[in-house]
């Protein structure tokens, strides 16, 4: 079978929480380590495997998303965590297409009753990692499933949709009027010129297969004169969030552009929008049509100096400035891990413009807002607190990541204002997160807030109760960390190992009265090898504070 098939992966991206079990899964790992590699193995026919966040688009994603769901030769729907968007999109696929849909999930998902009749292929997911054996096993299964579907694509009676299974006598599937309609919207002569040039591969990856010519060039309406485009034209979502937060915390007279985390936010990153590219597309189209009118063919046009110069600039623009949502998030996480906080915040702000209600992106923005300490520590914390209340609602949800953020913000606020009140708030959120998920992050911070409150109280009974509470949590954290470390030693590949070791070291330090022994020293040495810049500073400061606080509390018992 010649040609290229499309495989649209219906899935969440980033870290998603299962509301029933409170397990947090990194959904990107499933796509990057299993789904896409398997599809990329197929050569006859080739399979173009993609998620919505991998594509470039302008405006709302809805029209693109429905087309991808409808026109994809194969769809793989990952319903792990029962992500509502994935469930909805799977339903749309089942309604539009009677065949070629594969449903998958991690093996600990508690399926609702409605899925009892759906064939779901499961894989093992450790949360933040997938070990090599699990990748190998599921990849083999998926390879067989995809290979089995391909011959059925030409069969009229093929069916794996429960909609068409139960209603096959009453309905018929819709037919696409013109498949790959988005591609056909490009001027055919222009496309041939591009494909005769060295821009071909990158243009097909970043432009021709993803957006129409009209959708690219219409962005000229928002541009300023010449090539000096409006850099912030599509960077308004975070600005508006900050503007509302400014008003609520008493900064009504301050400009978001010149005060706080948003000030100069995009100064250090290049353009990532379509605007520069749209100028080049317009110029190229005009020049190509002018040469065509003179009777020149596409191959000859593509080597003309005036055309090849534009093509060279187009290639540069596409390679450096065209970023999908997934690419923006990758750059944001990379900058965060390298402690380039403002750059990370800028990329997350751009990602938010593409997906304005994405909880993971908002959580990262809240984190980076208080971490940046711009324009000062108190203002940054108050802004982060307001964003947290307005967009994440920690008092109404049971999302562990959100609760951890709330605990961290009030922990910082306790150092600059309303000490007693904010310590109790921080302890409440960390404690709630630990109770729900039994995780080392919320646990180690919950114990720290217990010991911090114990150091501040004048009541001996309350001090003793908090100290005992901290000791109990430390013991629980050590058990949690030991289980995770054993899993890693048994063949897992935890990319969070450094955080696990840090949490265990801090728990042991607390139980040992703030004194370092051989066991703790060995852990610290192991951490030093694995640590990254983002976590190192926080860890060392917390250890020093913990040592001092434990000594202070013990002296008062």
Image: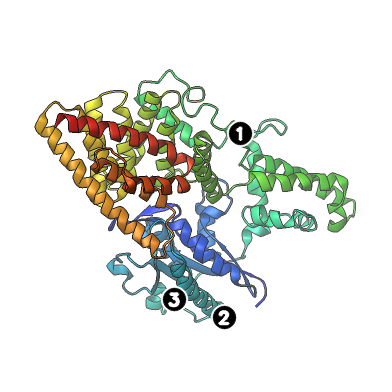
Callout 2–callout 3 Cβ contact below 8 Å = no
- How crowded pointer 1 is (Cα within 10 Å; few <14, some 14-19, many 20+) is rated as some
Label 2 – label 3 distance at C-alpha: 14 Å
**Relative image position of residue 77 (x, y in whole percent):** 44, 65
Q: Which residue is at 29% across, 51% downward?
A: 439
Question: Element at badge 2?
Answer: helix
State the residue position of label 1. 231
Is 102 placed left or right of 232 in the picture? left
Quadrant in which residue 249 is drawn: top left
Depth check, front residue: 342 or 230: 342
Which is more N-terminal, label 1 or label 2?
A: 2
Depth check, front residue: 350 or 223: 350
Quadrant in which residue 509 is drawn: top left
Question: Element at badge 3?
Answer: loop
Is 180 placed left or right of 121 in the picture? right
How many numbered discs? 3
Instruction: Give above or below for 41 relative to 428.
Output: below
Look at the image and tell me whether residue 72 can be seen. no
Closest to the camera, between mark 3 and mark 1, is 1
Q: Residue furthest left?
A: 461
Q: Which residue is at 35% across, 68% downward?
A: 107
State the residue position of label 3. 160
- How crowded pointer 3 is (Cα within 10 Å; few <14, some 14-19, many 20+) is rated as some
**Relative image position of residue 207 (x, y in whole percent):** 66, 52
Instruction: Give above or below for 289 relative to 455.
Output: below
State the residue position of label 2. 151
**Relative image position of residue 528 (x, y in whole percent):** 45, 45
């Amino acid at each position: 079978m010649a040609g290229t098939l499309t495989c649209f992966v219906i899935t969440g991206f980033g870290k998603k929480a299962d509301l029933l079990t409170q397990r947090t899964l990194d959904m990107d790992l499933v796509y990057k380590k299993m789904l896409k590699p398997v599809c990329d193995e197929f050569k006859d026919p080739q399979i173009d495997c993609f998620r919505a966040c991998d594509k470039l688009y302008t405006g709302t994603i809805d029209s693109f998303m429905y087309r991808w769901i409808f026109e994809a030769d194969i769809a793989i729907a990952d319903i792990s965590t029962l992500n509502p968007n994935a469930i909805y999109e799977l339903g749309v696929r089942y309604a539009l297409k009677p065949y070629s849909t594969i449903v998958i999930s991690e093996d600990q998902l508690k399926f609702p009753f409605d899925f009892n009749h759906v064939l779901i292929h499961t894989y093992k997911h450790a949360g933040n990692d997938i070990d090599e054996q699990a990748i190998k096993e599921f990849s083999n299964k998926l390879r067989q499933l995809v290979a089995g579907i391909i011959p059925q694509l030409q069969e009229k009676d093929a069916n794996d949709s429960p909609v068409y299974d139960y209603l096959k006598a009453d309905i018929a599937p819709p037919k696409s009027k013109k498949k790959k309609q988005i591609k056909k919207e490009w001027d055919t002569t222009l496309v041939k010129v591009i494909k005769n040039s060295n821009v071909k591969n990158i243009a097909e990856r970043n432009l021709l297969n993803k957006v129409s010519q009209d959708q690219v060039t219409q962005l000229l309406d928002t541009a300023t004169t010449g090539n000096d485009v409006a850099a912030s034209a599509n960077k308004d979502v975070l600005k508006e969030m900050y503007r509302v937060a400014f008003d609520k915390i008493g900064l009504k007279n301050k400009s978001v552009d010149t005060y706080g985390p948003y000030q100069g936010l995009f100064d250090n990153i290049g353009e990532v929008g379509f605007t520069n590219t749209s100028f080049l597309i317009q110029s190229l189209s005009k020049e190509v049509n002018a040469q065509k009118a003179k009777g020149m063919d596409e191959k000859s046009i593509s080597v003309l100096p005036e055309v090849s110069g534009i093509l060279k600039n187009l290639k540069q623009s596409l390679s450096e400035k065209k970023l999908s949502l997934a690419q923006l998030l990758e750059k944001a996480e990379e900058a965060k891990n390298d402690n380039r906080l403002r750059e990370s915040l800028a990329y997350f702000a751009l990602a938010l413009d593409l997906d304005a209600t994405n909880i993971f992106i908002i959580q990262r923005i809240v984190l980076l807002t208080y971490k940046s300490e711009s324009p000062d520590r108190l203002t940054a914390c108050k802004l982060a607190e307001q964003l947290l209340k307005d967009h994440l609602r920690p008092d109404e949800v049971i999302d562990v990541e959100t609760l951890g953020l709330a605990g961290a913000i009030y922990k910082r606020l306790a150092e600059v204002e309303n000490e007693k009140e904010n310590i109790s708030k921080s302890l409440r959120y960390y404690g709630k997160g630990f109770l729900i998920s039994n995780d080392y992050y919320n646990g180690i911070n919950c114990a720290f807030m217990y010991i911090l409150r114990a150091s501040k109280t004048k009541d001996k009974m309350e001090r003793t109760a908090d100290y005992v509470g901290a000791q109990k949590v430390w013991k629980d954290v050590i058990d949690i960390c030991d289980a995770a470390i054993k899993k890693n030693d048994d063949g897992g590949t935890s990319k969070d190992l450094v955080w696990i070791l840090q949490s265990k070291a801090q728990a042991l330090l607390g139980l040992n009265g703030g004194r370092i022994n051989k066991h703790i020293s060995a852990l610290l040495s192991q951490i030093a090898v694995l640590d990254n810049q983002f976590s190192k500073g926080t860890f060392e400061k917390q250890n020093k504070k913990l040592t001092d606080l434990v000594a202070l509390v013990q002296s008062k018992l």
